Image (cartoon, grey):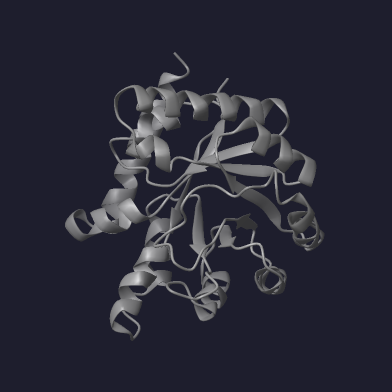
Protein backbone atom coordinates (compact mmCIF):
# COMPACT_ATOMS: atom_id res chain seq x y z
CA UNK A 1 0.00 0.00 0.00
CA UNK A 2 1.63 3.31 -1.05
CA UNK A 3 2.02 6.10 1.47
CA UNK A 4 -0.05 9.29 1.07
CA UNK A 5 1.97 11.80 -0.96
CA UNK A 6 2.30 15.41 0.24
CA UNK A 7 3.45 18.44 -1.74
CA UNK A 8 5.70 21.04 -0.13
CA UNK A 9 6.18 24.31 -2.01
CA UNK A 10 9.54 26.09 -1.79
CA UNK A 11 9.14 29.88 -2.03
CA UNK A 12 12.85 30.82 -2.00
CA UNK A 13 12.97 32.10 -5.55
CA UNK A 14 10.03 34.42 -5.12
CA UNK A 15 12.33 36.13 -2.63
CA UNK A 16 15.21 35.91 -5.14
CA UNK A 17 13.17 37.98 -7.62
CA UNK A 18 12.24 40.46 -4.89
CA UNK A 19 15.84 40.87 -3.80
CA UNK A 20 17.10 41.38 -7.35
CA UNK A 21 15.58 44.85 -7.30
CA UNK A 22 15.05 45.47 -3.61
CA UNK A 23 11.83 46.57 -2.01
CA UNK A 24 8.93 44.34 -1.06
CA UNK A 25 7.65 42.91 -4.35
CA UNK A 26 7.04 40.07 -5.09
CA UNK A 27 6.20 39.04 -1.55
CA UNK A 28 7.15 35.43 -0.70
CA UNK A 29 4.51 35.32 2.04
CA UNK A 30 1.84 36.13 -0.55
CA UNK A 31 3.24 33.23 -2.60
CA UNK A 32 2.99 30.96 0.45
CA UNK A 33 -0.63 31.94 0.96
CA UNK A 34 -1.37 31.27 -2.71
CA UNK A 35 0.29 27.86 -2.41
CA UNK A 36 -1.83 27.15 0.66
CA UNK A 37 -5.01 28.01 -1.27
CA UNK A 38 -3.87 25.93 -4.25
CA UNK A 39 -3.64 22.75 -2.16
CA UNK A 40 -0.04 22.63 -0.94
CA UNK A 41 0.58 20.58 2.21
CA UNK A 42 3.51 22.63 3.47
CA UNK A 43 5.83 25.56 2.77
CA UNK A 44 9.60 25.29 2.52
CA UNK A 45 11.96 28.26 2.94
CA UNK A 46 15.76 28.20 3.01
CA UNK A 47 17.31 30.78 5.32
CA UNK A 48 20.84 30.93 3.95
CA UNK A 49 23.79 32.26 5.91
CA UNK A 50 24.21 35.08 3.35
CA UNK A 51 20.42 35.78 3.26
CA UNK A 52 20.48 35.85 -0.54
CA UNK A 53 16.73 35.20 -0.80
CA UNK A 54 14.64 34.42 2.30
CA UNK A 55 15.24 36.86 5.17
CA UNK A 56 14.83 36.56 8.92
CA UNK A 57 11.78 38.81 8.68
CA UNK A 58 10.28 36.45 6.08
CA UNK A 59 10.57 33.59 8.56
CA UNK A 60 8.87 35.65 11.26
CA UNK A 61 6.02 36.50 8.89
CA UNK A 62 5.65 32.93 7.64
CA UNK A 63 5.36 31.63 11.18
CA UNK A 64 2.73 34.28 11.97
CA UNK A 65 0.65 34.22 8.79
CA UNK A 66 0.50 30.75 7.24
CA UNK A 67 -1.58 27.85 8.50
CA UNK A 68 0.55 25.21 6.77
CA UNK A 69 3.58 23.53 8.38
CA UNK A 70 6.82 25.43 7.71
CA UNK A 71 9.89 23.44 6.70
CA UNK A 72 12.95 25.58 7.42
CA UNK A 73 15.91 24.59 5.26
CA UNK A 74 19.17 25.48 6.97
CA UNK A 75 22.88 24.86 7.16
CA UNK A 76 24.35 22.82 10.00
CA UNK A 77 25.52 25.80 12.07
CA UNK A 78 24.88 26.98 15.61
CA UNK A 79 23.44 30.25 14.27
CA UNK A 80 20.80 28.45 12.22
CA UNK A 81 19.93 26.06 15.04
CA UNK A 82 19.49 29.07 17.35
CA UNK A 83 17.09 30.65 14.82
CA UNK A 84 15.14 27.42 14.38
CA UNK A 85 14.83 26.89 18.13
CA UNK A 86 13.60 30.46 18.54
CA UNK A 87 10.88 30.20 15.86
CA UNK A 88 10.08 26.48 16.28
CA UNK A 89 8.94 25.66 12.74
CA UNK A 90 7.27 22.31 12.14
CA UNK A 91 10.44 20.96 10.52
CA UNK A 92 14.08 21.80 9.91
CA UNK A 93 15.81 20.27 6.91
CA UNK A 94 19.60 20.37 7.20
CA UNK A 95 21.22 20.95 3.82
CA UNK A 96 24.81 21.45 2.63
CA UNK A 97 25.61 25.06 1.95
CA UNK A 98 28.48 26.72 0.10
CA UNK A 99 28.48 30.47 -0.48
CA UNK A 100 29.68 30.22 -4.08
CA UNK A 101 26.86 27.91 -5.23
CA UNK A 102 23.75 29.24 -6.97
CA UNK A 103 21.49 26.71 -5.28
CA UNK A 104 21.95 23.64 -3.09
CA UNK A 105 24.18 21.28 -5.06
CA UNK A 106 24.21 17.66 -3.93
CA UNK A 107 23.34 16.09 -0.64
CA UNK A 108 24.64 16.51 2.88
CA UNK A 109 27.45 14.14 3.82
CA UNK A 110 25.86 12.79 6.98
CA UNK A 111 28.17 9.77 7.07
CA UNK A 112 31.42 11.74 7.42
CA UNK A 113 29.98 14.55 9.57
CA UNK A 114 28.22 12.65 12.33
CA UNK A 115 30.29 14.21 15.13
CA UNK A 116 29.33 17.72 13.97
CA UNK A 117 25.72 16.93 13.16
CA UNK A 118 24.70 14.94 16.23
CA UNK A 119 24.58 17.79 18.81
CA UNK A 120 22.84 20.13 16.35
CA UNK A 121 20.20 17.52 15.54
CA UNK A 122 19.79 16.83 19.25
CA UNK A 123 19.07 20.50 19.97
CA UNK A 124 16.44 20.65 17.23
CA UNK A 125 14.74 17.46 18.43
CA UNK A 126 14.76 18.72 22.03
CA UNK A 127 12.99 21.88 20.78
CA UNK A 128 10.21 19.74 19.29
CA UNK A 129 11.26 20.32 15.66
CA UNK A 130 11.05 17.47 13.16
CA UNK A 131 14.52 17.05 11.66
CA UNK A 132 15.24 15.92 8.13
CA UNK A 133 18.55 15.53 6.32
CA UNK A 134 18.87 16.37 2.61
CA UNK A 135 21.07 13.55 1.32
CA UNK A 136 22.02 11.62 -1.77
CA UNK A 137 20.23 8.35 -2.55
CA UNK A 138 23.01 6.35 -0.90
CA UNK A 139 22.40 3.59 1.63
CA UNK A 140 25.41 4.62 3.70
CA UNK A 141 23.98 8.12 4.07
CA UNK A 142 20.57 6.74 5.02
CA UNK A 143 22.07 4.54 7.71
CA UNK A 144 24.00 7.53 9.04
CA UNK A 145 20.79 9.60 9.20
CA UNK A 146 19.16 6.82 11.20
CA UNK A 147 22.12 6.62 13.58
CA UNK A 148 21.98 10.39 14.10
CA UNK A 149 18.35 10.20 15.18
CA UNK A 150 16.86 12.18 12.30
CA UNK A 151 13.36 10.80 11.64
CA UNK A 152 13.19 12.08 8.05
CA UNK A 153 15.43 12.15 4.98
CA UNK A 154 14.96 14.05 1.75
CA UNK A 155 16.57 12.43 -1.28
CA UNK A 156 18.33 14.74 -3.72
CA UNK A 157 16.72 14.28 -7.14
CA UNK A 158 18.90 16.74 -9.07
CA UNK A 159 21.06 14.13 -10.82
CA UNK A 160 17.96 12.18 -11.83
CA UNK A 161 16.32 15.31 -13.28
CA UNK A 162 19.44 16.15 -15.31
CA UNK A 163 20.10 12.61 -16.57
CA UNK A 164 19.24 11.01 -19.91
CA UNK A 165 19.36 7.49 -21.36
CA UNK A 166 21.06 4.84 -19.26
CA UNK A 167 22.07 7.43 -16.68
CA UNK A 168 18.41 8.32 -16.15
CA UNK A 169 17.53 4.68 -15.50
CA UNK A 170 20.46 4.32 -13.12
CA UNK A 171 19.63 7.48 -11.16
CA UNK A 172 15.97 6.53 -10.89
CA UNK A 173 16.85 3.05 -9.62
CA UNK A 174 19.13 4.61 -6.98
CA UNK A 175 16.29 6.77 -5.70
CA UNK A 176 13.80 3.92 -5.70
CA UNK A 177 16.22 1.63 -3.83
CA UNK A 178 17.07 4.33 -1.32
CA UNK A 179 13.40 5.14 -0.66
CA UNK A 180 12.68 1.47 -0.03
CA UNK A 181 15.65 1.19 2.35
CA UNK A 182 14.60 4.33 4.22
CA UNK A 183 11.16 2.85 4.80
CA UNK A 184 12.64 -0.44 5.95
CA UNK A 185 14.83 1.20 8.60
CA UNK A 186 12.03 3.42 9.87
CA UNK A 187 12.80 6.75 8.18
CA UNK A 188 10.14 8.90 6.52
CA UNK A 189 11.38 9.54 2.99
CA UNK A 190 10.93 12.78 1.03
CA UNK A 191 12.43 13.83 -2.30
CA UNK A 192 13.16 17.03 -4.14
CA UNK A 193 15.39 19.30 -6.24
CA UNK A 194 14.90 20.05 -9.92
CA UNK A 195 11.54 18.28 -10.29
CA UNK A 196 9.36 19.45 -13.20
CA UNK A 197 6.13 18.39 -14.89
CA UNK A 198 8.24 16.08 -17.07
CA UNK A 199 10.22 14.43 -14.28
CA UNK A 200 7.85 14.29 -11.32
CA UNK A 201 5.64 11.31 -12.16
CA UNK A 202 8.20 8.49 -11.86
CA UNK A 203 9.32 9.88 -8.48
CA UNK A 204 5.74 10.36 -7.29
CA UNK A 205 5.01 6.75 -8.23
CA UNK A 206 7.60 5.42 -5.74
CA UNK A 207 5.29 4.13 -2.99
CA UNK A 208 7.67 4.70 -0.07
CA UNK A 209 8.13 8.43 -0.72
CA UNK A 210 5.83 10.50 1.49
CA UNK A 211 6.54 14.07 0.32
CA UNK A 212 7.93 16.01 -2.61
CA UNK A 213 9.40 19.49 -2.17
CA UNK A 214 9.30 21.60 -5.33
CA UNK A 215 10.01 25.29 -5.84
CA UNK A 216 12.15 26.78 -8.59
CA UNK A 217 10.29 25.16 -11.48
CA UNK A 218 6.90 26.22 -10.15
CA UNK A 219 8.03 29.80 -9.56
CA UNK A 220 9.32 29.91 -13.14
CA UNK A 221 6.16 28.35 -14.52
CA UNK A 222 4.11 30.94 -12.64
CA UNK A 223 5.42 33.61 -15.02
CA UNK A 224 3.46 31.94 -17.81
CA UNK A 225 0.38 30.42 -16.17
CA UNK A 226 0.22 31.72 -12.59
CA UNK A 227 1.49 30.21 -9.35
CA UNK A 228 -1.78 28.57 -8.33
CA UNK A 229 -2.25 26.96 -11.77
CA UNK A 230 1.28 25.56 -11.79
CA UNK A 231 0.86 24.10 -8.29
CA UNK A 232 -2.51 22.53 -9.15
CA UNK A 233 -1.04 20.97 -12.30
CA UNK A 234 1.86 19.52 -10.30
CA UNK A 235 -0.61 18.08 -7.80
CA UNK A 236 -2.63 16.45 -10.60
CA UNK A 237 0.48 14.77 -12.01
CA UNK A 238 1.57 13.59 -8.56
CA UNK A 239 -1.88 12.17 -7.81
CA UNK A 240 -2.11 10.36 -11.13
CA UNK A 241 1.30 8.80 -10.60
CA UNK A 242 0.51 7.72 -7.05
CA UNK A 243 -2.89 6.30 -8.05
CA UNK A 244 -1.12 4.16 -10.62
CA UNK A 245 0.80 2.41 -7.84
CA UNK A 246 -2.53 1.10 -6.47
CA UNK A 247 -3.27 -0.78 -9.67
Residue 143 image-quadrant placement: top right
Q: Is residue 173 left or right of residue 80?
A: left
Residue 132 pos. (x, y %): 64, 49
Quarter holding the N terminus is top right
Observer-nearest residue: 40 or 103? 103
Quarter holding the C terminus is top left
Residue furthest top in the image: 247
Residue 38 pos. (x, y %): 37, 53
Q: Is residue 29 left or right of residue 91?
A: left
Q: Is residue 79 left or right of residue 236?
A: right
Asked whether the viewer can see residue 207, the reply is yes
* Figure check: 61 above or below 92: below
Residue 11 image-quadrant placement: bottom left
Observer-nearest residue: 247 or 165? 165
User: Residue at point 55% right, 40% down?
Assistant: 136
* Figure check: 39 above or below 155: below
Residue 202 pos. (x, y %): 39, 27
Residue 155 image-quadrant placement: top right
Asked whether the viewer can see residue 242, the reply is no
Residue furthest left in the image: 224
Q: Is residue 135 left or right of residue 159?
A: right
Residue 175 pos. (x, y %): 51, 30
User: Residue at point 40% right, 57% down?
Assistant: 35
Amino acid sequence: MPLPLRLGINIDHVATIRNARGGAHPDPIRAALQAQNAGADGITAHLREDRRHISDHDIERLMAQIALPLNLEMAATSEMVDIACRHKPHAACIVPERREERTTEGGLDAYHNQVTLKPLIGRLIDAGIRVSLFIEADLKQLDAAKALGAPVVELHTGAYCDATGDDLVREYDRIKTAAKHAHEIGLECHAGHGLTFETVEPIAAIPTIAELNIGHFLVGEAIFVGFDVSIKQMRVLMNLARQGTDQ
